[in-house]
Image (cartoon, rainbow, N blue to C red):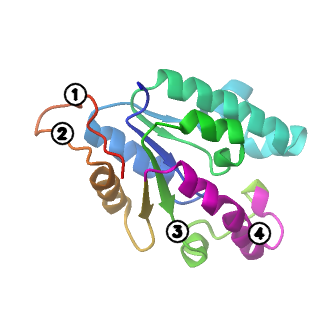
Amino acid sequence: MRGPLVVLVGPMGVGKSTVGELLAERLGTGYRDTDADIVAAEGRTIADIFVDDGEDHFRALERAAVREAVAGHTGVLSLGGGAVLDPATRELLAGHPVVYLSMDVDEAVKRVGLNTARPLLAVNPRRQWRELMDARRPLYTEVARAVVATDGRIPEEVAEAVLDALELRLPAGDTTPPPGQEKTV
């Protein structure tokens, strides 16, 4: 199956974009973020889409963005934190090298402050974070070949752990990954 070398999933603020960009650089390939694709296509923020059109509409946009990305992108791909909620989106991820980047609530507080800029954390953010993770953790795990904990790690360490988990390494100076180099863990 042709598609992304790595697909990153995980909660908001876990570092998918930062780690994704580092992985793309190390693997000599492109980086794509489905949230950025949606914002570019819609011409408005994700928070505005949630407020104006609702979560169901956003998830439909997200599913379409994921479908396009897994079919046409051969580099590193990051998905939005809630992409795995949609069963059809989870099916689109089947057979791809998905890595779940995890973090606990204390790490989330440090990284994003559980602020109201995140549309799903506007009221009682600590409780909502736990509820979101209780619902999403099994889905992240379901789609993932590997889980990489990000707690207490800098992005470079997380990127290295992802490469190790998928056994994705390039010979020095080579920027073309050998076919099938990823490994099911």
Query: Splitting the image into 4 quarters, where does residue 59 fall?
Result: top right
Disc 4: CA contacts within 10 A as few (<14), some (14-19) or many (>=20): some
9 up-or-down from 161: above or below: above
Q: What secondary structure is found at the residue carrying circle 2? A: loop
Q: Main secondary structure of the magenta part?
A: helix
Is the residue under label 1 in contact with that under label 2 (CB below 8 Å)? Answer: yes
For the magenta stretch, what is the residue range?
120-145
Task: Give, as a three-letter code, the residue at label 3.
Answer: Met
Task: Give, as a three-letter code, the residue at label 4.
Answer: Gln
Tell me the residue that label 2 is attached to: 170
Locate residue 62, reporting x and y percent. Answer: 69, 35
Could you tell me which residue is drawn at 73 percent across and 28 percent down? Answer: 42
Q: In 3D space, how far apart are the residues under numbered discs 1 and 4 (Cα atoms)?
A: 42 Å
99 up-or-down from 26: above or below: below
Locate residue 18, reporting x and y percent. Answer: 44, 50
Tell me the residue that label 3 is attached to: 103
